[in-house]
Amino acid sequence: MNQTAEASATRSDEEKFHSFVHAAIDKPYQIGKPHKREHSSRWADTIVMSATKSIAITVHINFKSPKLAETERLNLISLAAQGIGKYWSRDITVNGSLYKVSVTAQHKPDSPLPAILKIEQGTKDYGRSFNAGVLGVDARFIYNKGFFPSTKLADDDFMLVCAHEFSHSVLKAAGGISLSWGHKGTTGVISQAVKKSTPGYPTSGPIDLMKYYDDKKQKASFSQLVNDSIVSEKDLMRLIWLSRIQWK
């Protein structure tokens, strides 16, 4: 195959990839007419390696920690990055091909995606993290040090929480407030209350990282949440759609 034919085949593969991703997340796809938010994020970069069917995504977060000692700050940044990497990395199927996606979170002081790191020392009250996904409102990732009987449990909780809260930025940017604040249709947008139609936790298999479940219908153990939660393929494609993308 000559260079012209190879280049044409590469463009065709890229167009098929984009077309599939756009269709999967309900976004129109027209060559040469990108959506205003498509690949426009200044806090996410994606590299697609066609030959190895692998995708590397780096997300940049400005982790703020005004009240933490240096060792505490570094530890929480490390845990937050581990959590995002753990729950956002997975395989996805695009146009019949399986891609291995690896997500890495990095601290970047000038990132437009800020998150305040905080430690809750109390033993009775669980500090609630949040992320409105709105410019000018910093996300808050809270490490509940006093609530859990061991550091391991507190670490596991924090990593899962950080992955969930980061996801709100993706859903807000790709689908708007209703999708993000409404937890993909499982809660009220403003009230955050679980809807009557929302099912209980699955008894086995993956737990959608961004959906709420009705634990009155079916509870989940802490270990189940930690081990079975995962970002959905569609949400991961939303991140790819948002991020600046390169092909190799």
Image (cartoon, rainbow, N blue to C red):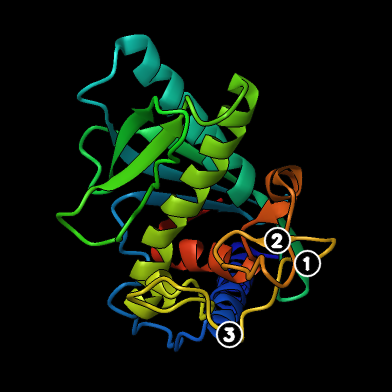
- Relative to 74, residue 40 above or below: below
Q: Position of residue 13 (x, y in %)?
A: 63, 72
For residue 79, side relative to residue 74 (left or right)? right
> Between tags 3 and 2, which lies in front?
3
Residue hosting label 1: 202
Q: Position of residue 219 (x, y in %)?
A: 73, 60
**The quarter of the displayed image where residue 85 is located:** top right
**The quarter of the displayed image where residue 61 is located:** top left
Give, as a three-letter code, the residue at label 1.
Pro
- Relative to 166, residue 92 above or below: below
**The quarter of the displayed image where residue 82 is located:** top right
Residue 14, numbered circle:
none
Residue hosting label 2: 207
**Regarding mark 3 in the picture, which secondary structure is present there?**
loop
Which residue shows up at 44% across the image and 57% down it?
Answer: 245
| Front in this rendered view, residue 19 or 155 | 155
Mark closest to the chain's N terminus, 3 or 2: 3
The local crowd at label 1, few if under 14, some if 14 to 19, many if 20 or more residues have their Cα within 10 Å, is: some
Q: CA distance from mark 3 to mark 2?
A: 19 Å
Which residue shows up at 40% across the image and 41% down it?
Answer: 127
Asked whether the beta carbons under mark 1 and mark 2 sit within 8 Å of each other, the answer is yes
| Front in this rendered view, residue 38 or 222 | 222
